[in-house]
Image: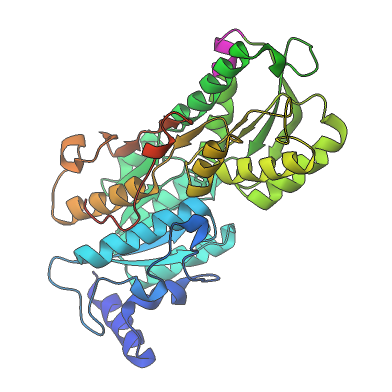
Amino acid sequence: MKKKALALLLGICMITMTACGSTSSQTSGEASAPAAQDGAAEEGGADDVSGAEEDQAPAAGSAVAGVVWYNFADTFISNARQTLINIGAADGTITITDADSTNDVSTQTSNMNNFFTQGVDYLVLNNINTGAISEICDQIQAEGCYGIFANTDTPSDEDFAKNDKLYSVSSVATQSGTIMGEALAQYWQEHPEADRNGNGKLDYVMLLGIQGHYDTTVRSQYSVQALEDAGIEVNNIGGEIICDYSRATAQEKVAALLANYSDEIDAVIACNDDMALGAIEALKAGGFFSGDDTYLPVCGVDATVNGCQAIKDGTMLVTALNNPVMLAKSIYKVMYLTNSGQEVTTESMGLEGVSVEGHRVWLDYSPVTKDNVDQATYDINDTAF
Ligand code: GAL
């Protein structure tokens, strides 16, 4: 860590008489304790963020990471965040401090700038300023710290070519789209009654996350592509319905859609489980899932605790396991390896379903249906990396 910034950080810690770890709440645009959402993130909290002892300089060989998450309240992010905090606390090599962008680009920018001012060694960015990736890469390079784009659009080849200290860690979103599309295609082919208005087309509603976000763009494209590849004629109802990965927004928008299209809709494709769950609530209120001939296939992504419960309940057809624990482990491992001068390769990462291409680290998804839902588990207290 840079000396001047370290002195500044220690000064702040001494004045406030709190552990450096609680910079989680000091640096946030609007900080909040980790949301114990979805029954997953129940332990730990903002005070657990640091692996370092109170008022002590980090040990030799250690480093500080500033992690900017797009939204602490997001279920998947809350689980990844808590796991990263837990790993940092258990290992102690990399001190994790984090900040909440509250789904707001200008808050993200000020969170980043705060971390730069503190002189962090690693800036981990769950970026939502998707139109400014190259500019952000240039800024990271000018600051001289490592930059890790996490769970978001990856920087371009040109960006990577300019800076050896740039990495990205993300799931292969194409897989999650294909998983939803293939499961829905199979259902459609096995259930002729699924064509509710008998028009020969699969009339689907598409629920999108944050506008322009890599995961949602790719998931929506590849799910529909898988249906078309299976020879199914499709029809989109309602256009691009942006719900920001939010359950409440999805519930509201699907409820509004049902007012006009209740008899037309054959399926809902949601680009995450939270939105799928919101859709299921709206569908239940609209008379679906209430007995014979009221089933509607709903697809999601993430395999959250509540998503898996919906699979067990028979309200969600399929989800794709997007493992937040693996995301956190991968982010930490990239920092751990580079901090000790080691190369980041598939072998050195050594994590199941994680592969490395240049400075891009990719995580695999896997399909989750009622047949294997009991195996779709992860433990945010698993700190082995
Ligand atoms: C996705 C995840 C969504 C949401 C999003 C935020 O990978 O499936 O539920 O968390 O990331 O960037």
Depth check: give the residue in front, 279 or 225.
279
Query: Does residue 93 show up?
Result: no
User: Which corner quadrant of the image does residue 192 belong to?
Assistant: top right
Farthest right residue? Answer: 260
357 magenta-colored: no
In this picture, is 12 found above or below 228? below
Instruction: Pinpoint residue 33: horizontal percent, then vertical percent.
Output: 48, 71
Quadrant position of the N terminus in the picture = bottom left
In this picture, is 365 found above or below 377? above
Would residue 300 be found to the left or right of residue 163 on screen? Answer: right
Farthest front residue? Answer: 291
Q: Which colour scheme is used?
A: rainbow
User: Which corner quadrant of the image does residue 115 belong to?
Assistant: bottom left
Would residue 264 be found to the left or right of residue 150 on screen? Answer: right
Query: Does residue 184 show up?
Result: yes
Would residue 282 be found to the left or right of residue 381 on screen? Answer: right
Depth check: give the residue in front, 75 or 277.
277
Instruction: Pinpoint residue 84: horizontal percent, then vertical percent.
Output: 33, 58
Seen at 73% across and 38% down, the residue is 283
User: Which corner quadrant of the image does residue 254 belong to?
Assistant: top right
Seen at 34% across and 52% down, the residue is 379
Magenta stretch, residue numbers:
226-231
Q: Is the magenta stretch mostly helix, strand or loop?
A: helix
In this picture, is 210 found above or below 12? above
Depth check: give the residue in front, 339 or 210.
210
